Image: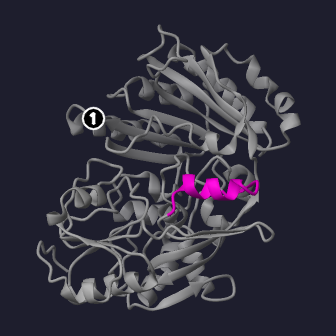
Amino acid sequence: MTDTPDLDLAALRAGFAGEILTAGDRERYDEARAVFNAMFDRRPAAIAKATCDDDVIAAILFARSARVPMAIRAGGHSVAGYSSSEGGLLLDLRPMKSIEVNPAGRTVRCGPGVTWGELDAATQRHGLATTGGRMTTTGVAGFVLGSGSGWLERMHGLACDNLVSARVVTADGRVVTAGETENAELLWGLRGGGGNFGVVTEFELRLHPVGPTVYGGLRLHPREQAVTLARRFRDFATSAPRQFAGGLIFMTAPAAPFVPTQLQGRPAVALLEAWFGDLAEAEVALAPLREFPTPAVDLTGPLPYARLQALTDAANPAGRRNYWHSDLLAELADDTIDAFVERADLAASPFSSMILARYGGAVADVPEDATPLGGRAAPWFYHCYGTWTEGEDATHIAWVKGTDAALRPWTTAGMALNFFTAVDQDRVLSAFGPKKYARLQALKDRYDPDNVFDRNQNIRPSR
């Protein structure tokens, strides 16, 4: 397929119920093409806003017939730019926002246009939740298909571990259901294999009793306390029960009313903590955290689960430039922490951040071959988020790449590919390993042999 700026849309309009936008639609077109990561300011030839399965089918068949590339947008949070397209067709799934909660069966069905904030709002009415994104604006679709790491994972596994079934439109326009008893191998591939095998138009997810009130929040410390704080956090989190979730966020303190004036705009480290066990047990279970260095700001206590999920929203608005790298850590020794803090201190932008968090728990309970994702036994992970609005891209990207190089001696393979801006075939192969990649490739050969769905962490067909 080739990028083609002009499309004859008559055939698509004839079989498509949703709105179709082109550059002539100006503001609506610009809003529809905008994505989270401003590094990708792309202009598709047309944007097809799907409202149902038939619209998705029509868009796929049109793109194939017209021999134009097709990108798929759900939440639009792909940091690698997969949910945008230069030329060709952008299939926008955001209008497909159905949510149906089954409180008795503890499941929810939702459309691909739903965000985690929307899903949490619906499930929390019943005191239920599943592992969701750490930003409420993240889309359910890409998050689940790419594995889905969130604060609930130590209690209830990754988002993909909670995928019960999926309705999928394949590259040839068929609609199939993937579940434990029907197309089970396809379900296996969808649990972390990304958008390689079709367009998922409905997700069924397992829910768990969570909230509506949990215990948690943020404690903000000056950066000078970072090494001591990180070592004490490591010692506590290593033996903490899986009801505890949390991590350290290396950031620039915001110019917010709750931050002391002398800390505003300066390097800081925040301890984000969450307790998903009995609220009455929270104070005793988290008591060792009170023995840490005294924070400059303490915003912990009982709070709605939905608010906990939104704690990092303000620091991560759409429209900034982003370059990310993440990895699993095989250990968190003192020298690992020293290297981590040193890299955080070299951040090239006040909007950049690094997260160091505990892994394991229910994630490690799932057998390695149960999903495409590897590295489940890793005890820790880190995210390095290069984020900026000013300055040369090369400067900020170099900081992220330098962090990757500095921390590589302690990393282990298997990190989910959602957390990378740059993904080549070597990274895809290392994430899944050769045996699982071969199994994913067999699924690709069956459901998308022509690689129609190639705007992703691509599993290439074998022929």
Q: Amino acid at mark 1?
A: Thr
Is residue 434 or residue 10 the one in the foreground? Answer: 10
Q: Would you say residue 137 is visible in this rendering?
A: yes
Q: Where is residue 253 shown, x and y percent of the image?
A: 47, 21
Q: Residues within 10 Å of mark 1 (few under 14, many from 20)?
A: some
| Residue plotted at (58% across, 86% down) | 177
Q: Which residue is mark 1?
A: 389
Quadrant that contains the C terminus: bottom left
Q: Is residue 226 left or right of residue 417?
A: right
| Residue plotted at (36% across, 38% down) | 386
* Residue ranking furthest to the top: 262
Q: Where is residue 172 shown, x and y percent of the image?
A: 38, 91
**For residue 313, above or below residue 198:** above
Give the color scheme: rainbow, by chain, secondary structure or one colour: one colour
Q: Which residues are magenta?
A: 114-130
Q: Would you say residue 448 is visible in this rendering?
A: no
Is residue 309 or residue 126 the one in the foreground? Answer: 126
Quadrant that contains the N terminus: bottom left
